[in-house]
Amino acid sequence: MMPPSFYRLSIACVGLALVSVQAKQDVNLLAIHPQHSYADVENIGELEGALREALGDLGGYSFSRGWWKWDRLRQRYVDGGRKEDNSTRILRGVFRGLILDWYAKLEADGEEDMFYIYFTTNSGDKTKRNSADGRTLRRDYHGGGYHGGWGGACRMRIYEELVRQNMLTNAEQATMKKIVYQSLESRFLDFKRGSQHADNHSFGNGGGVALGIKLFPGAPQAKEARSWLDRIWNHMAEYGDWTEWNYYPYGPIFLHGMLDIAEATGRIDSESKLINAIGKRCLQFNHGGGVKGGPNCGIRQRNDWSSVYADPWNVGYYDVETSSRDGNFWYRMAQHYKNPEYLWAAEQVALGGRPPNGQMPQEYQLAYSKRFAWFVERGIEPRVPKMQAKVGLLSELNHQVKERIYLNPGLEPDKPYAAFFLYDKKDSHLDNVSGFLYEYSYNGAKLLHSSGKYNNVYSGDKLRGGGSGNESLDALLVVHNRHQFPLHPDRLGDNRDYRRMYMAKHLPDLATAKNNDSGDAYGQFGFADYFGPESQWIRKAVLTVEGYLIVADEYQVGQKLDQDYHAGPVWHLARVEGRKPGRQEKNWFGAPAFAQAWWQNEKMGVAVYIHDHRQMVYGTINQNCSQDLELNTTAYAYRPIKAGQTERFLGVLIPHKLSTPAGSIVRGVKTSVSKKGKFLATIGGVKVEMDRNGHWSVNR
């Protein structure tokens, strides 16, 4: 148990919070608020007024993401036992500035009837919507557009708490009722339009509506709103999950919405089995290595953790769009269900997790105590989930879709971890990712990860988000010989270069994952019609407890491919500044890790060794990548393939300290591939075997 002093921020910057109205032009109040604590602020009325004025004077404010941080301030106050009353003064200033004063500002211009605080299904685009009488609704001024409800539950919870504390006048409450009533009118919302199923749109918007009709049951369209909430919830319940695969930023938007709706409609307990099934699937996306990857979302770490330690409620360990909000989802799950594994996940994404020796520096301990004081006070400690190699299931309660393969001997911080994405059905936020390795980590180092937001997603014939195409995935690639391997024309395709999206069909019966008694892990999966009709790709992989990843590919070449194609594996390595790309003679590559955990002081890297078949060509290219990724280099190996044959490829990936050159590492590697499909790799004293029948072994 941490001493009480750990619960309070050592506020070096609180002096900045005590800004007088006269001096506010010298300090950007909104840039330094909310803060972790307001307990020591003496002139709280002055600060409340300054924040209210600053917010009310804005020309626009996010009705979606902008409210999340203020709701976390409310949650800190509530979870602290409602003792730190200065926080409610800040919340009142925020609510008055952004809701009541905003309404008055519009009223002065004769536009108060255009103000709405949930979302709107009116026609328009991202910045403007059409009102019922032909006027223009400006996003983040009159309301938040279609995404504006993402902050709706936050607004309603803050209002509910202020009423509970008698912080608003009767007249102010009457104005809020008027605002809620008009926001739910049919001139803003048609509950039969917009998303009618479980996704980030509906669930992100649904929480505010659910709490709105709970607090104001007589509001217009309350019946229609309840029917819509039931529809989107039942869609999730009937399927047993939600089907957006891009976790950042959309996952926390959906997941918070799930909890918001459940809390407001009484489903937290009655639907606990479903909520926990979804929570436990997402729990599997985490491990204790202090680094992270994800399909179609780059997950950067921060380079400086001082901001995380100073305010862990508002700054998360990973530098992603929903940084601190991800940790707050796990916080809420752990709180509702008193589940220490959810608390473990919250610590991983909020602070980066504990080192292998369990020794945390004081600033980490202080940050943990500030972020998780509610749990510390109740003696609830985080617990590492017990998970080894497995096939991850989407809709585990109902459809049991084989979605991912996880290879690992456990989730402790120094253990290896690899994950492949399998599912071949896509939504608008995820493209051609089936079958690729989306994370390979060991001992606090992320060795491989290439896919980022909107990677390989097109608008017309142009790639979105600066991404690259099929060659941006760590998988087996097949390219017509008229193209320079690995530059595939992607999902556009033609009669010669087959697209992969919507063609490759996952073969779920082949998907398997298991551990041996030593903790080594084995996984296998396959796809039919892979880069061509009647072609089949099967990948087998062993992840040893030493962190070695041995990957064997078998590709049955369909007749339509004839003799016109090249095939081979592509791997994505961290960009080495000054290293020139191009073809090379050697059959191995080396690069530093993409990222390292806060506790990993040894510089780590990876060596990639490719079994040297006859006619093999090796090389690297530097390419564009999505906006949320670090620059990387595609390392490739390919050779001609022939229709009707089964082509085999073998790669060995070895983590190592950068103080030992990759060339020295690969000298200890020996490989062989037989015509009968037996793969053999020896790395030092570790011998790994796999065969076409799924048998595998690791001997030391």
Image (cartoon, helix red, strand yellow):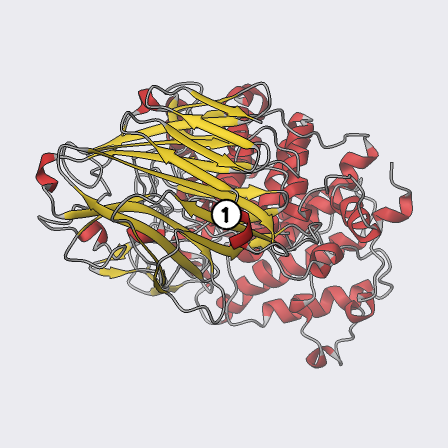
- The image shows residue 521, relative to residue 133, as above or below, that is above
Quadrant placement of the C terminus: top right
Mark 1 Cα shell of 10 Å, populated few (<14), some (14-19), many (≥20): many
Residue 432 horizontal side relative to residue 523, left or right: left
* Count of numbered circles in the view: 1
Rendering coords of residue 626 (x, y %):
40, 59
Residue, disc 1: 666
Say which of 18 and 648 sits in front: 648
Quadrant placement of the N terminus: top right
- SS at mark 1? helix
Q: Name the residue: 49% across, 64% down.
A: 576
- The image shows residue 151, relative to residue 340, as above or below, that is below
Residue 431 horizontal side relative to residue 521, left or right: left
- The image shows residue 376, relative to residue 19, as above or below, that is above
Rendering coords of residue 473 (x, y %):
36, 48
Identity of the amino acid at label 1?
Val
